[in-house]
Image (spheres, rainbow, N blue to C red):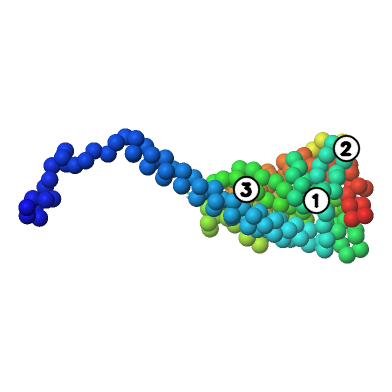
Amino acid sequence: MSASEATTENPATQPEVSSWAMFRTLCGVALFSGLIIVVVYQTTLPFIMENRRLATERAIFEVLPDATQRVTFSMEADGPRVIAEDEAVLEKFYAGYDDDGNLVGVALEGAGQGYQDVIRLLFGYDPEQEQVIGMTVMEMRETPGLGDKIADDPRFLANFEALDVRMNEDRSGLLNPLVAVDQGDKEHPWEVDGITGATISAQAVTRIIRNNAEQHVPYILEHLDRIKEGLS
Ligand SMILES: Cc1cc2nc3c(=O)[nH]c(=O)nc-3n(C[C@H](O)[C@H](O)[C@H](O)COP(=O)(O)O)c2cc1C
């Protein structure tokens, strides 16, 4: 038989593969793939967690510039409780202290919808001055060159070095509305100078901090004495 005759063989004459054999092969491939995914996940998880921990650690000292040491608290109904680093709690915050053990501020985590996806950030709050004293973006997928300026534009970040978040008398809300204004229009210490072309991202950051401050600042102020003793 010539080579050309061999390649034109009728497929109907080829041996038939049984459905059971195909099913077994498919199951094998699926099991193997699943196993690979589980092994890769389990192997990389500790590294991912450690990187997250280091990033949070860096961020805490970034948003609390005068802090040299810190303590993690869980927010509980009967007051804040010092917790171990790996303790899983519903809500927590970080208190920062100077070398002499004086409280210099607390760092709070916040998240909310940005232009593209969820923005996760950490901001520092000084309970004595009732001001936000620092902000860093932990996670975002805003557009490069536009929305991502919320993370690295020094002019925008300067907004959060002394941002007024005083509470009203009965601590039911902020004394002044924390809002993002058009770039260059900031007049008051409770306004955030926005980013031209990325108004939505700038407003998102402002909204995240406003919601978080309204929710947690009354708790921080109420339990300030306990937080000040955090190192003892
Ligand atoms: C492709 C594309 C990506 C954009 N990404 C962002 C973004 O990440 N953040 C943002 O606030 N606006 C983004 N914008 C712009 C918004 O649609 C909107 O025009 C802008 O936030 C309004 O800001 P302005 O009032 O200063 O013009 C994007 C627009 C386009 C076309």
CB atoms of marks 3 and 1 within 8 Å: no
Residue 157 shows in the view: no
First along the sequence among labels 3 and 1: 1
- Label 2 vs 1, first from the N-terminus: 2
> What is the residue that sits farthest to the left in this orientation?
1
Query: Which mark is in front, 3 or 1?
Result: 1
Query: What's the mark number on residue 84?
Result: 1
The residue indicated by pointer 2 is 78
Residue type at mark 3 is Ile
x and y percent of residue 196 in the render?
Answer: 58, 53
- Give me the residue at 51% from left, 47% from top: 35
Question: Distance from label 3 to label 1 (Cα)?
Answer: 26 Å
Q: Quadrant of the C terminus?
A: bottom right
Query: For numbered disc 2, what is the local secondary structure?
Result: loop
Residue holding disc 3: 119
Q: Is residue 67 left or right of residue 121?
A: right
Q: Residue type at mark 1?
A: Ala
Q: x, y percentage for residue 216?
A: 79, 42
